[in-house]
């Protein structure tokens, strides 16, 4: 699925696929070749959870790595969403290393998923060095990854993913914040015409207290830097 045009079903296969890494409730039964799901007796794949359980039982403390991965959608916003989701999952699940397996041809949309975390402002700003626990009440549509910065107290960076085809009003709760949130976003519309697909600054918003609300456009990745 490398076309610039994908069906809704193909888009959802790509943007939901990272859930196979960790979600103990997700079954990839709509995949046209669901052989792993079938071999597991029609149970959730939960790759990282299964591996970590084996490590805990046989060799506690061993590091976990994914030596090759890819999700498709290299020329579509779906690929950006899947890649950003992968990176958030790798950090949250304690993966030591992971290697993106690039396809033949162009894959700027997939690389854009990295830019949601690295140099998202074009001036060297990155996701924080300390992952914060984050959960979603609606994983099928929205996931948010959160971080703090040990070198800059009070600085927090969130990467918010909307994999649904409609906008989602999303409340981010639990972390005490104060200051200004700078917003950077990748959508299908913003990517059109870009030689290098990357986040676009969409302005700022004040934040205060332990909750703020943001509207995430359909099929988008939004990086939120608070300081």
Image (spheres, helix red, strand yellow):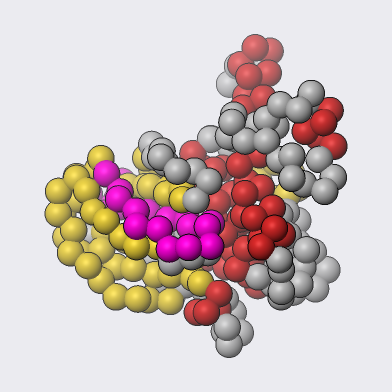
Kindly indicate the quadrant of the structure image that contains residue 97.
Answer: top right
The answer to whether residue 116 is visible is: no
Pinpoint residue 24: horizontal percent, then vertical percent: 59, 29
Q: Residue at x 70, y 58 (%)?
A: 9
The answer to whether residue 167 is visible is: yes
The image quadrant where one finds the N terminus is bottom right
Pinpoint residue 211: horizontal percent, then vertical percent: 22, 48
Of the pair 221 and 146, the residue shown nearer to us:
221
Residue 208 sits above or below residue 59 on the image: below
Of the pair 96 and 54, the residue shown nearer to us:
54
For residue 80: magenta?
no
Residue 45 as seen in the image, left or right of residue 221:
right
Of the pair 65 and 74, the residue shown nearer to us:
74
Q: Residue at x 71, y 40 (%)?
A: 28
Q: How many marks?
A: 0
Q: Residue at x 57, y 59 (%)?
A: 81
Q: Which residues are magenta?
A: 150-173
Residue 136 sits above or below residue 122 on the image: above
Kindly indicate the quadrant of the structure image that contains residue 192.
Answer: bottom right
Pinpoint residue 48: horizontal percent, then vertical percent: 64, 32
Residue 218 as seen in the image, left or right of residue 70:
left
The image quadrant where one finds the C terminus is bottom left
Of the pair 167 and 58, the residue shown nearer to us:
167
Q: Residue at x 77, y 68 (%)?
A: 2
């Amino acid at each position: 699925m490398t076309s610039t045009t994908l069906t809704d079903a193909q888009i959802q296969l790509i943007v939901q696929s990272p859930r196979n890494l960790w979600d103990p409730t997700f079954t990839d039964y709509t995949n046209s070749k669901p052989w792993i799901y079938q071999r597991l007796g029609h149970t959730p794949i939960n790759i990282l959870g299964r591996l970590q359980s084996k490590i805990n039982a046989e060799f506690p403390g061993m590091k976990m790595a994914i030596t090759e991965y890819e999700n498709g959608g290299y020329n579509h916003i779906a690929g950006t969403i899947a890649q950003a989701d992968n990176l958030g999952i790798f950090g949250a699940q304690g993966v030591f290393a992971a290697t993106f397996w690039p396809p033949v041809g162009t894959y700027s949309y997939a690389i854009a998923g990295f830019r949601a975390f690295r140099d998202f402002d074009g001036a060297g700003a990155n996701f924080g060095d300390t992952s914060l626990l984050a959960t979603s009440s609606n994983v099928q549509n929205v996931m948010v990854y959160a971080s703090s910065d040990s070198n800059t107290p009070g600085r927090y960076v969130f990467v918010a993913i909307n994999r649904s085809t409609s906008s989602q009003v999303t409340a981010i709760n639990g972390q005490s914040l104060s200051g200004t949130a700078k917003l950077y976003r990748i959508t299908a519309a913003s990517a059109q015409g870009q030689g290098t697909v990357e986040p676009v600054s969409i302005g700022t918003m004040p934040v205060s207290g332990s909750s703020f609300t943001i509207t995430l456009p359909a099929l988008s990745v939004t990086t939120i830097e608070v300081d």
